[in-house]
Amino acid sequence: MLATLSVPLSPGGKQCESLRHWRLAALCELAVLCIAAPLAQADTIRTRVGIGYTGQVVGIDAQGLLINHAGAVRTIPRDDIVRVEVDQYPDVAKAETLFDRGVSGAAEAERFYAGVLAADLPSWLRAFIEWRLFRLRLAVSRYPEALDAYLLLMQENPQFAAGVTWSPVSENDPDRQRAMLAKIDEALRKGPPDPIAGQLTKLRNVLTPAPRTPLLPAAPSLPKPLPQVPPPSSDAAEKAKIAFASLFGDRLAKVQATAEPQDDVALAADLVQAAKIAGSQPEFLILVCEKAWELGNKDPAGYAAAAEAMKILGEKIPAMAESCQQKMFVTMQQQYEHASGPARAEAGNSLLEALVRMAEQQERLGNSDQALAYWRRAQDVATAIGSARKSQIQASSERLAHRQQTLVRIAERIRQSQAAPQDQKVREDIFFLYAVELDNPAEAAKYTDALGDEGMKRCAQQAASPAEKLSEATCLDLGDWYRFLADKASPAAKSNMLAKACGYYKVYLERHTA
């Protein structure tokens, strides 16, 4: 372009004057070109460690977003992304600001994201927003809508969706359960890729009530119900509101009038201190702690106060412990997702403890599907933060998953046996599933009629008795029997069978005097 410019010569034909005119003409034409050309649109990705990448996002894959930054394409992992800004769609930045506030900004963030989705978007941005909506809805326990976002994400970008995991789901409404199951079944019929099919199958297992039959092992007995808090009298509730308003009303009004979250966080911290010294006035305590939780969740700086408020409320009013635990979990999850560096590891450890505690609690209550969801989420967090408990948590997850799979197999064999009572092979399978895979000799003993070997029958019946009631000879026989069963066991059950064998051999050696 510049080579075609005419170079006017001065009357004296001086070369320097010609060169000056040539440069001036070139600069003018270049300026015209720059003004006429549209300004380049830029995308910006900000990460947890404070680094920002500006350029053009060129795609999305299983790991995260691909951005052309300074002439090189980089992959920004999804878990490192804190904020995305797109010049062409300014509402994305507004939605991201609200998304970062967690539960308190969820509704407004969703409104902005939905508005952006109405435009003709590049595929990467549409998939990214569906992922954001999925996480928002999951955080506020809107599971049917979260499933809708997940299924749309699966259609937009299966590769990216394959790396998306579900946190524990607890949908108790039967109608919503049925609607979600219908959508999951429809999606599975279309044959999605393995990682997505696995996620949908896990979710389906959580939403599907476990098969109930008297022939299956009894669930652990439920703990005694916690004392219920009587509904507050209108007089007590009114007095609590008056007391709260007199102490915090003016300040709360000022906080609510500002857009910045810092004053919300400061008030949340003060409310937590008030909750610590509050007397035996449940109505007032509930107001203080729930408002502290609400305000604290408006900014990452307030997550610690929000979690502490629920901890105090659950300890002082035991009947509210379960709901407080659920709210603490929501806050801990947000705290972990928004943290970086050493703070992320610390938040991850706190979240890990909560997940393990909830998994163990659900196991004690006999809610195996829910417990398994918590164990798997704990396994993901333990892997991400490099926890020393990773192997232990993985073992617990695999143990419970194996138990669930075995129960399904037993239920299927029982149905087959009921349809064909004369089929002894099916009853023999049930025996070995109980005796070996579940280590439940008492239930296995009900199916010993299917065993042709009298020695096997005898050992199966004796194994249901405590070792201290057995003779040393019987302990030796049972050691041999469990060693034999170890050869029939799956990898998940083999070590347990060998441990049982060693236990009986040890009892034999302790008693044997010859």
Image: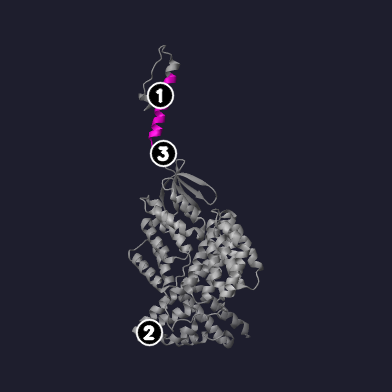
Tell me the crowding category of disc 1: few under 14, some 14 to 19, or many 20 or more residues within 10 angstroms, Cα based.
some
Q: CA distance from mark 1 to mark 3?
A: 23 Å
The x, y position of residue 48, in whole percent, is 53, 52
Disc 3 crowd, CA 10 A, few/some/many (<14, 14-19, 20+):
few
Q: Is residue 301 left or right of residue 414?
A: right
The answer to which image quadrant residue 243 occupies is bottom right
| Looking at the image, residue 301 lies above or below residue 415 | above
Residue 242 placed where, x, y %? 60, 68
Regarding mark 3 in the picture, which secondary structure is present there?
loop
The answer to which image quadrant residue 511 occupies is: bottom right
User: 496 above or below 166?
Assistant: below
Please, what is the dominant secondary structure of the magenta stretch? helix
Q: Is residue 91 above or below residue 318?
A: above
N-terminal-most mark, 2 or 1: 1
Q: Is residue 46 above or below residue 504?
A: above
Does 60 sit left or right of 341 as displayed? left
On screen, residue 376 versus residue 422, left or right, reads right
Dot 1 corresponds to which residue? 25
Snapshot quadrant of residue 244: bottom right
Provide the residue designation for mark 2.
424
Q: Which residues are magenta?
A: 19-40
Q: Amino acid at mark 2?
A: Gln
| Among numbered discs 3 and 2, the one appearing first in the sequence | 3
- Of the residues tagged 3 and 2, which is closer to the observer? 3
Q: Amino acid at mark 1?
A: Ala
Q: Position of residue 94 (x, y in %)?
A: 47, 51
Disc 2: CA contacts within 10 A as few (<14), some (14-19) or many (>=20): some
Could you tell me which residue is drawn at 45 percent across and 76 percent down? 488
Q: Is residue 172 visible?
A: yes
- Residue at numbered disc 3: 39
* N-term mark: 1 or 3: 1
